[in-house]
Image (spheres, rainbow, N blue to C red):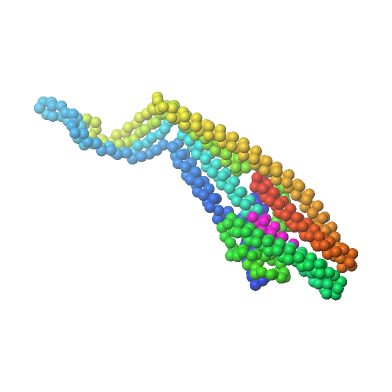
Amino acid sequence: MKKLFGLFILFTTTVVYGLDISFLSLAQCEYDALNSSAQLQSLQAQVRSSRAQEKSVSSSLYPTLSLDGKVSWVSEVPSLTVGGTELKFGDTWGYSLGPTVSYMLFDNGGRGALKKSASKALNAQEQSYEFARKQILLQVQQAYFSIQQLLQRLVLLNGQLEVAQKQLSDVQSAYKAGAKSKLDVSIARKQVFKTQTAMSGARSMLAGQLRTLFKLTGTDYGINPSYPTDKRLAKAKEESKTSTVLNTDSLENTLRVFRPYAQSEFDENSPKLAALDEMAQYYEYLANSYKSSLYPRVILQGGAYFEYPNGAIREHVFLGRAGAAVSVPLFEGGKDRQQAKAQKELARAKSYEKEDAQQTLEALFSSAKDRLYGLQVQENLLKETIKQADETARLTYQAYKAGAVTFFEVDRANLDLLESQLSLADVQVEELNQLAILNSLAKEIL
């Protein structure tokens, strides 16, 4: 079973910017998406329909019992005059009533093949449902990862903003004292505005990603996504009104849950491939059913009836009747042969489709594994780069205060640090995307 984390959507009573914090967990989003999906509901209905169809076809393997009745009328009854007396052989009115049992004794496997084809159709629908379920989970996961990415971006940008605001304050004080130039103040102020603009852009993008997630889950959880922010920015000074405060599973915890999928193996019998294989077999059995129509059929029938008249004798009688009927097709214009051929070709088409799908899915799986390896290398390098960039930014600002470098160098060092931090978050989220792809195509781990 999938590893799920987080339990429910929780709305805490903690207040930030006058708003309650809304907690979105990935597990709850996955649960809601699966329960609200019209696509899955449609596929479930198709599964139920296929199951009913299979039961219907299976009933043809058993005898049928019916209550048969008939009434007859003839305008003239044969008669014979003997010794001046007219003897009628029968009566104008007649009827027959009683139970009848019928059974197809031999049809060259036609009903069996039809039953197997119905079973394969049911299996194909069930596998199609499972594949759609995995795809919906993948979509929800990737939408959720994007929200985590943008929230992390907001936090990092806010950290840079706090640094930029402090440096602006320092530069302004130094400028008033005559120690720094107006250019330094201008550059420092530009750094603040640039970071605020980036934060606003990230919040707008976050609003769009929340809308995407809400569409997938079928609910907005009572959240106004127009201009959201992150819970970790509780002490940040906001220039614009915040619509909602979000808290999600941490990026680090999500990575910890998904990292084991890096060791997964491609499922050669994944739901997509299994559904195509079942459909190929469905058409094969359907072809066999059509071919069986070219051979004789033997039907047994028997019953007990209450009748009048008893043949030529005008009396009521209770009698049993049994018999066998043989049907031998002589000419049907090639209809069943062509139908069998058509189903064979459809089976062949599904086999080729499965082959193509398998190549595509294997390529996607391998590509995700290759991509994941490169991302893991980048992640390690970026962590080292951030350490160095942080040290460089700190030393550069000290050097600036000592008059050894210009504020351009300070601005550049701060930007290098921010870019490295943002790149690390982007790489980690891309790792999650690749891990989610691997999980959607991998063998189930119970």
- Magenta span: predominant SS is helix
Task: Determine the residue located farthest toward the front in the rendered image.
Answer: 182
On the image, the x and y values in percent for residue 181 come to 84, 69
On the image, the x and y values in percent for residue 200 come to 68, 64
Q: Does residue 1 appear in this view? A: yes
Front-most of 130 and 305?
A: 130
Establish if 232 lies above or below 177: above
On the image, the x and y values in percent for residue 191 come to 76, 64
Left or right? Give the position of 12 relative to 339. Answer: right
Report the residue at 45% width, 41% height from top: 56
Report the residue at 76% width, 65% height from top: 190
Quarter assignment of residue 69: top left
Task: Determine the residue located farthest toward the bottom in the rendered image.
Answer: 177
Read off the magenta span. 143-156
Report the residue at 54% width, 44% height from top: 125
Task: Determine the residue located farthest toward the left in the rendered image.
Answer: 84
Quarter assignment of residue 85: top left
